[in-house]
Image: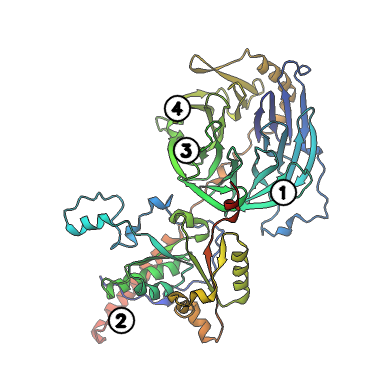
Amino acid sequence: MTATRPQKRYYRQRAHSNPMADHTFQYPVKPEKMDWSQHYPQFFKPLAESCNHDDRKDLQDEKRPSPVVEFADIGCGYGGLLVELSPLFPDRLMLGLEIRVKVSDYVKDRIRSLREAHPGQYQNIACIRSNAMKYLPNFFKKAQGLVYTITDVKEVHEWMVKHFTEHPLYERVPREELADDIIINRLGTCTEEGKKVQRNGGQNFLAVFRRVEDQEQMSSP
Amino acid sequence: MALLGIHKELLVWSSGSKFIAINTEENSEGGKSFVFDCNTASKKSQENDDNKGGDGGTEEKGSDKILAFTFSSSGQYFSLTDDNKRLILFRTKPIWECLSIRYVVRRCTALTITQSEDQILVADKSGDVYSFSVVEPQRPAELKLGHLSMLLGVTLSHDDKYVITADRDEKIRVSILKSPYNIESFCLGHTEFVSAVVVIPDHPKQLLSGSGDGTLRLWEYKSGRELQCWDLRELNDPEQKDNEKKFAVSRIACSLKGGHVAVLCDSFPAVHLFQIDTETQRLEFKETVRLAHCSWDVAFDESAGLWVLQQSEVSTATLYKLREGHWQCAIEDPKLKTTVNILCNHWDMFQVSLDAESRYHNLYKSVFDNMAAYLLKKEERIQQQGKRMKRQLPESSGAKSI
């Protein structure tokens, strides 16, 4: 059965969902127990399966380290950013986290239909319905990296900048250092919200942060 | 709610809004006791608006019920938190003296004092940990760290380097006390709320945790690695007569000497005894002691005697000692006799905690699968559309919508 492209009008849900309420979410007990094969079937064998293949490709694959999800879109909405970035980084896995029932289902259907329409492509993106605030540590181990934030609401931007800057473990990456960054140019244009802002002639506020060492820990014995 | 805490010769028994501290030393003027009732503590003035924090919930009127207490490492300090959001600090030597009464923003579930005895860390229902100074007893609190779920336990590593917090979302978080925003690791494995966390004496790198999932787990907390897991359901109900019954760990007590561990499950009249094997460093199950009555709490004294606070007027306090490899009731023990004599005059304070609702019952989350309901509707919609398409087919151009 072919997957037809999902129509947004069947998946509309209001923008706000209370993250403090107890919804029912599926999440692994810990990152090591996460079965990524259902989300990235071309990258992962199912967890339980024992690897006893004679197929040459499989033997070669075993030498390569297990792939990890490197990009996380927290609050991925209708998946615009994931779909845009997928072909730019075909070997890097990306995960969208979305708390809303209908919207996360839309993204899953969209990815399914894209994979079918373009064989071999869009295998590196997936969407999970979850409360990132509570369950991020269940999916991901500690890692370093960059945080990209974008919003069209100035106060939200100022709030995010304030908190990240005040946080001893983060520092803002200056604009000059981001000149070659492929992601930031697309952030404001490829998402549903971003397109809405463009249509309304609004402005997008961008800020990027990176994890730094704990100064407190470094100074103490 | 009734609790038991021990530091050397001092045994503290609490129930409702009162606690009684009994000094079991023989030459301490005949087993002197100190009684304190939170009812008598000064109330916060009505002008101060507790609700400024705007947590959005309705503020229920609290009682003066004691929710948790702790001794400092030397026993010099004792601190408790009650249902009226008080944090009370006492000095215990040479005599009991109330040093300060401060207020917490939200009701607390657990507290601990640093090894250096400079601060009290309290864990509250909104997920935050606050630090209250011991050295400056009137100093206001400082926010240290926060979880996104109600906290149920807080403990420290022996060197005060790490603060370990346990929440309702099955998580145990290990953070660096001096920079609490810096998370060292998570100990993930429990499948229900984590109700008890303890760093084992003499085993500074290891943590024991108990949960509503009925398990006791041993961790190497710095890396978050789980070392052992005990399913207490197997010990409580070996024939599996009742699969629906849930067991929550209400207390993990550790002895200072001998590596003994006693585990109490909520509403279950038994104590499970374990011991850490000195060679293998593994936790070994020793025996289950069936109790005559349901018990509120257990604690070890410094000679590894296990005291039990029971729901019984006749034997409110009882004591077990390890004799010839088995834990046996030590009815003749002089300290037990002294304690029982004093407690029998205070049965009324324990009576108020009888038949109290289990405080773990509501921690289990009620599950509503909104995803399933949505998918059902979606399936119906697709089928409806399919039927409509079939009816239209002869007139359509045959093009499928992509």
Q: Secondary structure at mark 2?
A: loop
Chain ID of residue with mark 4: B
Determine whether label 1 and label 2 are within 8 Å by CB: no
Can you tell which quarter of the image residue B30 is in? top right
Chain ID of residue with mark 3: B
The disc, 2 or 4, on the residue closer to the chain's N-terminal end is 4
The kind of residue on which mark 1 rests is Val
Q: Specify the label residue B401 is tagged with.
A: 2
Q: Nearer the viewer, residue A187 or B313?
A: A187
Q: Quadrant of the N terminus of chain B?
A: top right
Cα–Cα gap, marks 2 and 4: 65 Å
Q: Confirm whether residue B210 shows in the render.
A: yes
Q: Secondary structure at mark 1?
A: loop
Nearer the camera: disc 2 or disc 4:
4
The disc, 1 or 3, on the residue closer to the chain's N-terminal end is 1
> In this rendering, would A22 be left or right of B387?
right
Q: Specify the label residue B23 is tagged with.
A: none
Q: Which residue is mark 4?
A: B285
Q: Nearer the viewer, residue A209 or B395?
A: A209
Q: Quadrant of the C terminus of chain B?
A: bottom left
Neighbor class of circle 3 (other Cα within 10 Å; few <14, some 14-19, many 20+) is many
The kind of residue on which mark 2 rests is Ser
From the viewer's perspective, is residue A176 above or below residue B16? below
Q: Which residue is mark 1?
A: B104
Cα–Cα gap, marks 4 and 3: 12 Å
Q: Who's the residue at 66% across and 20% down the image?
A: B314
Q: Specify the label residue B217 is tagged with.
A: 3
Q: Where does the image place residue A73, in percent across and percent down from the top left?
A: 46, 67
Q: Who's the residue at 47% across and 37% down the image?
A: B218
Q: Where does the image place residue B394, in percent across and percent down from the top left?
A: 23, 84
Q: Where does the image place residue A7, in percent across and percent down from the top left?
A: 39, 77
